Every structure is written in C-alpha cells, then in structure tokens.
Image (cartoon, rainbow, N blue to C red):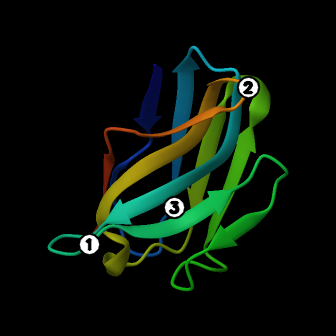
Amino acid sequence: QVQLVESGGGLVQPGGSLRLSCAASGSIFSINAMGWYRRPPGKERELVARITSGGRKNYADSVKGRFTISRDNAKNTVYLQMNSLKPEDTAVYLCNVDWSPGPGVGFGSWGQGTQVTVSS
C-alpha cells in the first residue's frame, strides 16, 4: 500500500500563485511517473502535468508557461508550482503516482485531492 498526502491548495486571486505538494509513503520499492490531474467543476478529469523518473515532463497546453512540475526522489514527493493563475484553473487537483512494491509489479495510486479556487 502507498499513501499520498497532498497539500498546498486554497483560495487565490487571479494572477496569484500556489504550490502543491504530494508526498508518497508506504511499501515503495520504486516510483516511476508522478503527475497532477485536475477535475474542474462539472467537467471530466484532465491531465495537468506529468514527470517521469528520468525527469521528462509534459504539460497540458492550457498550463504551459505558467505551471512547473518537479520532484524530489529522496522524499518521494512531487510538486506543482502554479503561477499566473486564472479562474479557469479552479478545480480539485489530484496527485497520481506510478509505483512498485517490488521488481516486475506496478500500481497506480491517487491522492485524495486538494481544492484550488481562483477568484477575486
């Protein structure tokens, strides 16, 4: 089992910044990709950003140039720095981690989600 603890959400004005964190703990042998998704009100879940174990990153077009994903492998933690926030960034943000408890076995796990609200 792995536990994902997210933090950093909240209410921010348009143009503001927030930094999300997601720390993984448990019986982890290795972590492959880590990422952030979001679920806007009344909409489907969508990818925000993802980073592989080798550091390759990909972003949704809507956040390119504004959001930056990073990870600290020693802490099994992934971050999402969000700048120049817009009202349309309002959503529940969910952490996703691809992890393995041992060689040849892999799982994907989700965090509980953290609310980000961008409003004046």
Q: Which residue is mark 3?
A: 17
Mark sitting earlier along the chain (2/1): 1
Tell me which residue sits at (32%, 77%) in the image.
87
Question: From mark 2 to mark 1, how far is it between C-alphas?
Answer: 33 Å
Q: Secondary structure at mark 1?
A: loop
Specify whether residue 89 is in view. yes
User: What amino acid is labelled 1 in the image?
Assistant: Glu
Tell me which residue sits at (61%, 46%) in the image.
79
**Image coords of residue 48 (percent x, y):** 51, 68
Q: Nearer the viewer, mark 3 or mark 2?
A: 2
Mark sitting earlier along the chain (1/3): 3
User: What amino acid is labelled 3 in the image?
Assistant: Ser
For label 1, the crowd category at 10 Å Cα-Cα, with few meaning under 14, some 14 to 19 and many 20 or more, is few
Direction bottom: furthest residue: 61
User: What amino acid is labelled 2 in the image?
Assistant: Pro
Q: Nearer the viewer, mark 1 or mark 3?
A: 1
Question: From mark 3 to mark 2, how far is it between C-alphas?
Answer: 39 Å
**Image coords of residue 81 (percent x, y):** 60, 57
Q: Secondary structure at mark 2?
A: loop
Q: Could you say which disc has been placed on residue 44 in the image?
A: 1
Q: Which residue is mark 2?
A: 103
For label 2, the crowd category at 10 Å Cα-Cα, with few meaning under 14, some 14 to 19 and many 20 or more, is few
For label 3, the crowd category at 10 Å Cα-Cα, with few meaning under 14, some 14 to 19 and many 20 or more, is some
Which quadrant does the C terminus fall into? Answer: bottom left
Q: Secondary structure at mark 3?
A: loop
Tell me which residue sits at (63%, 29%) in the image.
100
Give the answer, above or below, for where 69 lies relative to 103. Answer: below
Q: Nearer the viewer, mark 2 or mark 1?
A: 2
